[in-house]
Image (cartoon, rainbow, N blue to C red):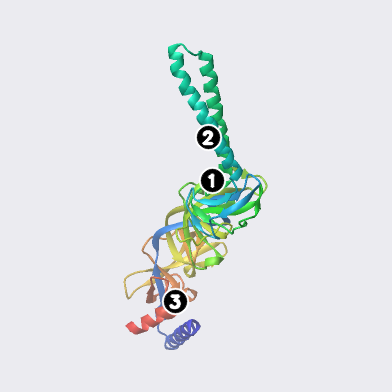
Amino acid sequence: MKKVFIISLLVQLCVTQMQAQATGAAAPPTPVIVTKAVSKPYADEVEALGTLRANESVELTSSVTEIVKKVSFDDSQRVKKGDVLVEMDTAEELAEMAEQESIMAEAQRQVNRLKPLIEQGAASTSTLTASERDLAGAKARMQAIESRIDQRVIKAPFDGVLGLRNISVGALAQPGSVIATIDDVSVMKLDFSVPEVFLSTLKPGVVIEAETEAYRGRVFEGRIANVDSRIDPVTRSIKARALIDNEEGLLKPGLLMKVELQKDPRDALLVPEEALVTDGPEHFVFVVVGPEGKQTVERRKVKIGTRSYGEAEVLSGLSVGELVVTHGTLRLRMGAPVVIKAVEKNGESLGELLKGSSAKQ
């Protein structure tokens, strides 16, 4: 449909010009579509690939060799810090604790009995010192037993989500064997590397946008938290870490994400790329000037900056608010009369602009 409108417009223009030449009359104004040069927030985009990590991540393992008596969690369960996950056989340790409690109680009674006797001069101080030493030793042995019992109870070290369970009741837990994983995924860490030339852009607080094939069309926003202290001498790149809120729990550790961050945010004068006329290394635009009904065009040389999403940044040669021709540039020359058929405002298609122009007529 777009091509049909363009061909129709060109054919109409050629016929009109041929008629004008045959009658010796001046060529009619060239119909054009224009847009206003506007200034708006703009930034150069830096792209990179990054990998997600949990805010905290731990593999839960046993530190002793013991039989598992109770498992208190399921796969992918959300737990709180301190929740008991696995209990192992502690029968031997509990028996030792009962014995040690008896010894400690007897040592305490001995100390309590000797204190008044020393005040009365009926016992020596060295006897009390020995009894207090025995009591302290009993308490230390009790603490050792309690520590051994604690080693046989595995608790959640922080709030998080458990992974797959790798142990069952009756199994022999051994040091180093992974019982499950636990991840704090409330906030995700996104680690990515960018070339060293963008080092000045990597500052804490800079906003980043990340996308993943797992959720197409969904943009996750985060902020740079930290930048590595070293540049890789081989790749000449530096690693940065951004934090992304994960309240919905959609993001998982290990997920590959495409990262975009903004370099040199600024207000820039932008025009559509179709308004540019290229002549070798130089760029020009046609600017509509003059009062309505007597409008002509100026061929203006401009200096172009970066381009993004169909727009070009104009560094010089153009002012905010000037009308720039976007369609019809191929038949224009310096000073040629023009008539504005439509004004492009929000990236409308050519068909929509011509349709709107016909409706006004």
C-alpha span from label 1 to label 2: 54 Å
Image coords of residue 183 (percent x, y): 54, 53
Q: Residue at x 63, y 55 (%)?
A: 170
Give the image quarter of residue 144. top right
Residue at numbered disc 3: 349
Image coords of residue 109 (percent x, y): 48, 26
Question: Judging from the image, what secondary structure is the residue with disc 2 in?
Answer: helix
Horizontally, residue 96 falls left or right of residue 8, namely right
Residue at numbered disc 1: 227
Horizontally, residue 143 falls left or right of residue 9, namely right
Q: Nearer the viewer, residue 3 or 234?
A: 234
Amino acid beneath label 3: Ser
Amino acid beneath label 1: Val
Nearer to us of marks 3 and 2 is 2
Badge 1: few (under 14), some or many (20 or more) residues near its Cα, within 10 Å?
A: some
The single residue placed furthest to the front in the displayed view is: 122
Residue at numbered disc 2: 101
Q: Earlier in the sequence, mark 1 or mark 2?
A: 2
Q: Residue at x 46, y 11 (%)?
A: 121
Question: Judging from the image, what secondary structure is the residue with disc 3 in?
Answer: loop
Quadrant of the rendering where the C terminus is positioned: bottom left
Badge 3: few (under 14), some or many (20 or more) residues near its Cα, within 10 Å?
A: few
Q: Earlier in the sequence, mark 3 or mark 1?
A: 1
Image coords of residue 324 (percent x, y): 41, 68
Nearer to us of marks 3 and 1 is 1
Amino acid beneath label 2: Glu
Q: Nearer the viewer, residue 297 or 263?
A: 263
